[in-house]
């Protein structure tokens, strides 16, 4: 279950339990006990009645019933709206599984518009509690959250457009995509709580899928040149290039417009003083640099030695070791960097 939905549906059980309002007792049951919507219009409120042997257990039962009612409202509203199924402006299909969206109930202390409206105790001591959601108040809360999140998304999209082909643009788009998914969850809730207010929402970024598509396409705009001095066979250049292309980046041999450069040098030298085997020492130094700012984004180095009965085979072993080091050590560094545009 998502973080947003977990927040929204995990705390009705805690909401207002600290309240000390007295429990009313009468012989005749109020209308809301059996027909809450007849007393409190369903167009203005989501109502749910719970009962128990005491006030606390009755509130827990009412909270669970209200959470279920909210869940059902979201699912029904989604099923009735064509906007929840189809293709977005970018041509990507969107399907949402609302049946799995909410599982159980919640803490809504920080969300306005939800309360335990009233209570009643029958002659046998059974306590009834009415849990209620004010559609207007809670809807306004979620609409505000949607608009605030949309503003962040638009800011990230604008930054990415102005800095196209950079790791910073990719980080901005990834953040925008994450925020767009979060906003979709807010929209899902709003459509079930207040469909009229939902219809007033207008998103310039269109949909979460559209933003995700932009983020997925950004890596191919990032150009990197790869040069490895001393790599006569080209094997190390190929090893570095494979890492970048596997992440969707574009490798170019000598493009003056390439924003990034992987510069490396390798040396494999014979070590003297050994009788039975031939030893060589290998040293690789590399750095991923921003050609505009001159900043080193990822420095990397590895060194060691290899042995064999012949010097040429020892050198080949050293070369294979360096290849493996690039794949096993440099690649995780780069993937981590790429995921968060982190600095090393």
Image: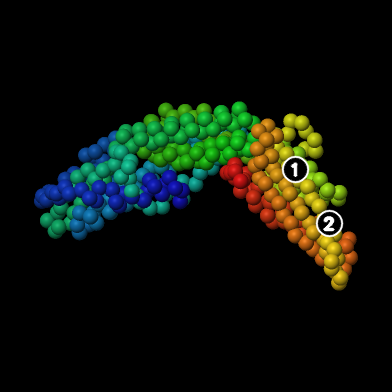
Residue 16 locus on image (x, y percent):
25, 47
Disc 2 designates what residue? 269
**Closer-to-camera residue (6/253):** 253
Disc 1 designates what residue? 263
Image position of 280 with respect to 68: above or below: below
Residue 18 locus on image (x, y percent):
22, 50
Instruction: Give the residue displayed 58% in from the left and 39% down from the top.
Output: 171
Circles 1 and 2: CB atoms closer than 8 Å: no
Residue 220 visible in the snapshot: no
* Residue 313 relative to residue 193: left or right: right
**Closer-to-camera residue (228/303):** 303
Q: Secondary structure at mark 2?
A: strand
Instruction: Give the residue displayed 78% in from the left and 33% down from the top.
Output: 255
Whole-number angstrom distance, CA of label 1 to CA of label 2: 20 Å
**Closer-to-camera residue (169/85):** 169
Q: How many marks?
A: 2
Residue 294 locus on image (x, y percent):
68, 35
Image position of 299 with respect to 305: above or below: above
């Amino acid at each position: 279950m998502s973080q947003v939905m977990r927040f929204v549906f995990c705390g009705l059980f805690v909401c207002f339990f600290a309240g000390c309002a007295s429990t009313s007792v009468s012989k005749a049951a109020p209308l809301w006990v059996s027909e809450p919507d007849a007393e409190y219009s369903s167009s203005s409120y989501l109502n749910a009645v719970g009962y128990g042997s005491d006030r606390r257990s009755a509130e827990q039962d009412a909270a669970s019933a209200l959470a279920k009612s909210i869940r059902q409202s979201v699912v029904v509203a989604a099923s009735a709206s064509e906007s929840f199924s189809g293709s977005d402006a970018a041509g990507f299909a969107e399907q949402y599984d609302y049946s799995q969206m909410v599982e159980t109930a919640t803490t809504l202390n920080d969300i306005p518009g939800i309360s335990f409206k009233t209570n009643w105790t029958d002659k046998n001591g059974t306590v009834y509690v009415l849990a209620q959601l004010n559609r207007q108040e809670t809807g306004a809360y979620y609409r505000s959250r949607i608009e605030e999140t949309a503003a962040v998304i638009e800011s990230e999209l604008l930054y990415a457009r102005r800095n196209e082909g950079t790791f910073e643009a990719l980080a901005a788009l990834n953040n925008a995509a994450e925020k767009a998914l979060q906003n979709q969850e807010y929209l899902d809730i709003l459509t079930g709580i207040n469909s009229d207010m939902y219809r007033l929402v207008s998103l310039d970024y269109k949909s979460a899928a559209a933003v995700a598509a932009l983020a997925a396409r950004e890596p191919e705009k990032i150009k990197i040149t790869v040069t490895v001095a001393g790599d006569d066979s080209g094997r190390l250049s190929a090893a570095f290039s494979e890492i970048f292309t596997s992440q969707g980046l574009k490798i170019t041999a000598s493009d003056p417009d390439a924003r990034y450069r992987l510069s490396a040098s390798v040396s494999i030298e014979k070590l003297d003083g050994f009788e039975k085997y031939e030893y060589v020492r290998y040293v690789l130094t590399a750095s991923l640099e921003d050609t505009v700012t001159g900043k080193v984004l990822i420095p990397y180095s590895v060194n060691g030695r290899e042995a064999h009965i012949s010097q040429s085979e020892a050198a080949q072993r050293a070369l294979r070791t360096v290849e493996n080091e690039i794949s096993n050590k440099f690649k995780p560094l780069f993937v981590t960097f790429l995921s968060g545009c982190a600095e090393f």
